[in-house]
Amino acid sequence: MGVAKITNRDIARMAGVSPAAVSIAINGKDGISEETRKRILAIARQYHYCPNGADRRILDGRSRYIAALFRTDANLEDQTFYSEMGMNAMVACREKGYTLVMTYITGEDGVIELPPAIRNGEVDGVLVFGDQEAGIYAELDRVGVPFVVLDSSRAVPGQHAVSVDYAEAAYQVTCHLIELGHRDIAYLSNGTLHDFNTLTLAGFQRATTEAGIALYPNRFQIDVEDTPSLRACVDKALDGPQRPTAIFCTVDIYAINMMRYLRTRGLRVPEDISVVSIDDILISQFVSPPLTTMHIDRREMIQCGIEMLEQLLAGHGCENRMLRAPQLIVRESTAPIQ
């Protein structure tokens, strides 16, 4: 049999006051002595009284709001990946009794400005989507709000983060191509995403080196930023006496965009060129052909981040987390070499 929840009247009886006095104390209003207020709140905490909404903040000092912080100038691949993370975050926060506030960083001439909800202490903690420059972390520290960086590719001392083993993801998906018989594989990435690119390139080169594969220099293209630059990189990667039989794009949105471009060049996927990537965004299973990719568990990433925030809010330390090994999702964009 469940235990009945304590009510406003129960607290009033135990404190020897009226229900109106309990309401005044819980809502932080004037009209009772400080001694009476403390007695009422102590009883409420002792018996785990659960008021609604803003009343809860009076008891535990928490707003029950968490901010998701991202940059509005993020590249297309970040916007796609992190928009799906945001949806997972809203669901996970609701399950934990939090409300998610989607916020973004602004600033001009190198001056960083955090959203008012964070600057004014209206949120309990912050989930930072993706690696940011050091000044943003310094500003969060100055404000004094706990934060956890999600999808981090860096190791920053003292920073709490949830990371993905992108080197292992790149290694696995490249090995998949090699197992299909591909030995001439192009690599497409965005070099401005320095830490992420370093990890994926390391995994790619580990797989090709183990297989004894030597690649032409033009097979490495790291200047992808938008559609025109992606097409230019693809053209360079395909240049030479023979074209590569497979292309590894470091994120799904590049691969999806590239497959459309390959069709305009009269090339078929996977008959002429196999294509792989990392992320497993929702649309990757619905494009034609469906994309072979490495699944990054965004739900697990969000859950880890919230758990770490709760530990920080409770005054405890927390260990950085590395997600479980990414999972290879084989679809129709890859095939054995002809």
Image (tube, rainbow, N blue to C red):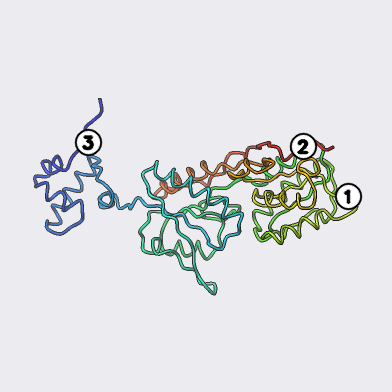
Q: Residue at x 65, y 44 (%)?
A: 287
Q: Residues within 10 Å of mark 3 (few under 14, many from 20)?
A: few
Does 229 sit above or below residue 309? below
Q: Where in the figure is residue 270, as x and y percent of width and height?
A: 76, 41
Count the numbered circles shown. 3
Q: Earlier in the sequence, mark 1 or mark 3?
A: 3
Image disc number at residue 310: none
Q: Earlier in the sequence, mark 2 or mark 3?
A: 3
Left-right relation of 316 to 297: left
Instruction: Look at label 1 and name its amino acid.
Output: Gln
> What's the amino acid at mark 3?
Lys
**Displayed quadrant of residue 177:** top right
Kindly report the distance in space between the C-alpha atoms of the residues bearing marks 1 and 3.
Answer: 74 Å
Three-letter amino acid code at the position of disc 2: Ala
Residue name at image x 56 percent, y 63 percent: 73
Q: Residue furthest right?
A: 241
Which is nearer the N-term, disc 2 or disc 1? 1
Mark nearer the viewer, 2 or 3: 2
Please give the label number shown on residue 335. Answer: 2
> Please, what secondary structure does the residue beneath circle 3 have?
loop
Q: CA distance from mark 2 to mark 3?
A: 60 Å
The residue where tag 1 is placed is: 242
Question: Mark 3 highlights which residue?
Answer: 5
Disc 1 + disc 3, Cβ < 8 Å: no
Q: CA distance from mark 2 to mark 1?
A: 19 Å
Instruction: Residue at 54%, 74% (x, y): give it.
Output: 109
In the image, residue 185 lies at what x, y percent?
80, 47
Q: Secondary structure at mark 2?
A: loop
Please identify the quadrant where the N terminus is shown: top left
